[in-house]
Amino acid sequence: MESMQKRVVIVGAGPGGLGAAMLLASAGCLVDVFEKQPYVGGRTSGFEQDGFCFDLGPTFLMMTYILHELFQLSGRRLEDYMTLQEIDPLYRLIFHDGREFLPTRQAAQMKAEMERLFPGSYQGYQRFLDVESQKFTRLVPRLRVPYSSWRDQLNWQFFSSLPTLDAHQSLHTKLGRYFSDEDLRMAFTFQAKYLGMSPWECPGTFSMIPYMEHARGIYHVMGGLQQITRGMAKAFAEDGGQLHLSTAVQEILVEKGQTTGVRLENGEIVKADDVIINADFAHAMTHLVKPEKRRKYTDERLRRKKYSCSTFMLYLGLDTLYDVPHHNVVFAEDYRKNVEEVAKGRALSADPSIYFQNASVTDPSLAPAGQSALYILAPVPNKTSGIAWDKELSQYRDVVLDTLERRAGLKDLRSHIVTERVLTPDHWEQEHAVFYGATFSLAHNIGQMLVFRPHNKFEEWEHCYLVGGGTHPGSGLPTIFESARISAKLILESYGQTLNAADKANH
């Protein structure tokens, strides 16, 4: 590859863009990454405020072997760039009646916990692990296929995996095979929120997510998950990659059906053999590509697509450290009503479900001694709802804090706040260039998965590739890492090259 010196431009320094950049630079490509923010990571970035350190977006890390493989493929060890810590218990789940469930990967402890709260349920849990293990083994290799055309989907490997796909039923229905108790079913279906979807609408395919948590664990990266993209940027630079921060792309250049490079906001044109788009997909199409250059993804068609929910975020620096687990979920007293209000409503729920991370119990480096960094997320409707956040913010903040003080054991929370930042769907859209403020990108309904999702080798023009949550395999860090590997492989294969031998060993 070194003799070919192919030049690749990547728009955006999120985990997908940096993952692809790391792989391509290690294979000998000349890679430039342009990022409009003064920092790397996109939604997987972080910030410091008054001595407290917060992750902006993702706080769960699963399927860590994929991240290990990306670093392996670039000739490195993940351990040299970051430190992972498994979280146990997985999380604390607080039900409507005040009962608390603390799932764990310790078998004896998990059995005791389940039998205490849900007598007779452990047998269903064992069946869940056994059946979903087989599904995981069969389906994960299918997620590494690019689905650039129907040929990729209409083959025997795909059809042989159909019986385990469970796409014809909802995640809620699928988990009913194992758990009859509604609260217990919630404990294994709330993960649909990682995709910004309702368990009653999310395809049963995604039962893989709770399986991955219980079978393979949930991890924290010491210093925050922002260390992932910082580590990728470091590895990328070591192979000669050029990272351009505070350098916005104004336009993706398309000539005669192929991308030829980008125009920066300062007017400079950067030519490239290939362009990778890591910006939010719908935002990139509507802001970085001229309308006349788009046939399939017109503004009207993009508006008609289904998008995930958004999130209301509170980042609180506290002068105390609460004695609660790392990850916590407070279910709404009427969970299904809350989920439907988020997915379909035009107003904010008075009874929200809330996730919060008390990461300082695991990682003291995130706050001054004896204090803590508290991360709070409440799923809310995206910008299509028409909610006026300039009017609703203060009241909804009170609803969230009241719920945590009343139901989550965070007594007198308000009195301990020493610094605070708030993000609404408006902020996601305006400050972080997320279309409709839909934090988890395009929804993951059947009509927007696999070949129906925007392709890794973008179908509109030649020499253009996609990475990130808006392309195959989908949103969430593990699948975004896979999108980076898929697109990097496609580019290298187009020039008769392959990723190194470690890649072959993993298949």
Image (cartoon, rainbow, N blue to C red):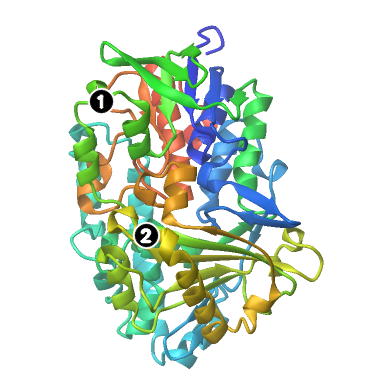
Q: Say whether residue 361 is left or right of residue 219.
A: right
Which of the two residues, 475 or 136, is positioned nearer the viewer here?
475
Return the disc, 2 or 1, that comes first in the chain's sequence.
Answer: 1
Does 461 appear above or below 442?
Answer: above
The structure residue drawn at horizontal position 37% and vertical position 57%, both measured from the top left corner, is: 195
Residue 463 at what x, y percent from top left? 35, 19
The numbered dot on residue 301 is: none
- Cβ atoms at labels 2 and 1 below 8 Å apart: no
Quarter in which the C terminus is drawn: top left
The numbered dot on residue 388 is: 2
SS assignment at label 2: loop
For mark 1, does the 10 Å Cα neighbourhood hold few (<14), some (14 to 19), or many (20 or more) residues? few
Residue lying at the far front of the rendered structure: 391
Which picture quadrant has residue 92? bottom right
The structure residue drawn at horizontal position 17% and vertical position 39%, both measured from the top left corner, is: 154
The structure residue drawn at horizontal position 27% and vertical position 36%, both measured from the top left corner, is: 147
SS assignment at label 1: helix
Does 4 appear above or below 402?
Answer: above
Which of the two residues, 241 or 306, is positioned nearer the viewer here?
306
Residue 292 at what x, y percent from top left? 23, 21
For mark 2, does the 10 Å Cα neighbourhood hold few (<14), some (14 to 19), or many (20 or more) residues? few
Three-letter amino acid code of the residue under disc 1: Pro
Which of the two residues, 190 or 260, is positioned nearer the viewer here?
260
Residue 506 at what x, y percent from top left? 48, 40
Three-letter amino acid code of the residue under disc 2: Ala
Which of the two residues, 346 or 30, is positioned nearer the viewer here?
346
Residue 460 at what x, y percent from top left? 25, 25
Q: Which residue is mark 1?
A: 291
